[in-house]
Image (cartoon, grey):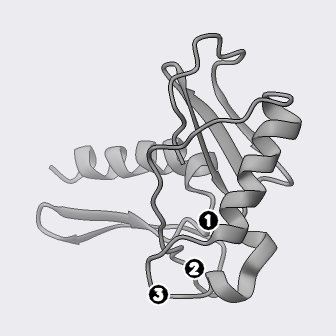
């Protein structure tokens, strides 16, 4: 979810909460927060897109109680995703065929490990060009 503009956003950077299950960061003067799938794993084991109100409420409570201490925000941008998981907690970073490369199956930790995965993917692309 991405919040309304916050004039006095008190942080800059990327942060994790609840053992990495919740992530948040600023995007300029807005808050991006996501994750929380661990509180409703049965519903979140799906291949269908859709909002999960239980998780949305959970994330809003974290913002109010832990991040912005009592502030209630509006979230004009919301979306859902599907976690690419497998039997191992190792992302796939590979060349599919000539000029087609892929990085996927981040196991719900895209924000936490995405920059390192992107770095490895970039190296793979450069080395194979």
Residue 123 x %, y %: 35, 45
The residue beneath circle 1 is 108
Mark 3 element type: loop
Q: CA distance from mark 3 to mark 1?
A: 14 Å
The residue beneath circle 3 is 47
Whichever of labels 2 and 1 marks the residue nearer the N terminus, that label is 2
Q: Residue at x 59, y 49 (%)?
A: 113
Residue 102 x %, y %: 32, 65
Q: Residue at x 52, y 19 (%)?
A: 29
The residue beneath circle 2 is 85
Q: Residue at x 51, y 76 (%)?
A: 84
- Whether residues under marks 3 and 2 lie with C-beta atoms below 8 angstroms apart, the answer is no
Mark in the foreground, 3 or 1: 3
Q: Nearer the viewer, residue 45 or 50?
A: 50
Q: Residues within 10 Å of mark 3 (few under 14, many from 20)?
A: few
Question: Where 99 sits versus 50, above or below?
Answer: above
Q: Residues within 10 Å of mark 2 (few under 14, many from 20)?
A: some
Q: CA distance from mark 2 to mark 1?
A: 8 Å
Residue 89 x %, y %: 66, 73
Count of numbered marks: 3
Whichever of labels 3 and 2 marks the residue nearer the N terminus, that label is 3
Mark 1 element type: loop
Whichever of labels 3 and 1 marks the residue nearer the N terminus, that label is 3
Q: Nearer the viewer, residue 79 or 71?
A: 71
Mark in the foreground, 3 or 2: 3
- Whether residues under marks 2 and 1 lie with C-beta atoms below 8 angstroms apart, the answer is yes
- Whether residues under marks 3 and 1 lie with C-beta atoms below 8 angstroms apart, the answer is no
């Amino acid at each position: 979810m991405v919040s309304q503009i916050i004039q006095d956003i008190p942080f800059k950077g990327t942060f994790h909460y609840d053992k990495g299950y919740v992530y948040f960061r600023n995007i300029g003067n807005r808050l991006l927060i996501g994750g929380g799938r661990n509180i409703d794993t049965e519903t979140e084991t799906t291949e269908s897109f859709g909002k999960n109100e239980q998780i949305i409420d959970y994330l809003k409570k974290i913002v109010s109680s832990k991040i912005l201490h009592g502030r209630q925000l509006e979230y004009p941008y919301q979306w859902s995703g599907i976690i690419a998981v497998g039997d191992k907690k190792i992302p796939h970073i590979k060349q599919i065929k000539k000029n087609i490369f892929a990085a996927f199956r981040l196991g719900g930790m895209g924000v936490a490990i995405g920059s390192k995965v992107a770095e490895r993917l970039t190296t793979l692309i450069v080395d194979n060009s």
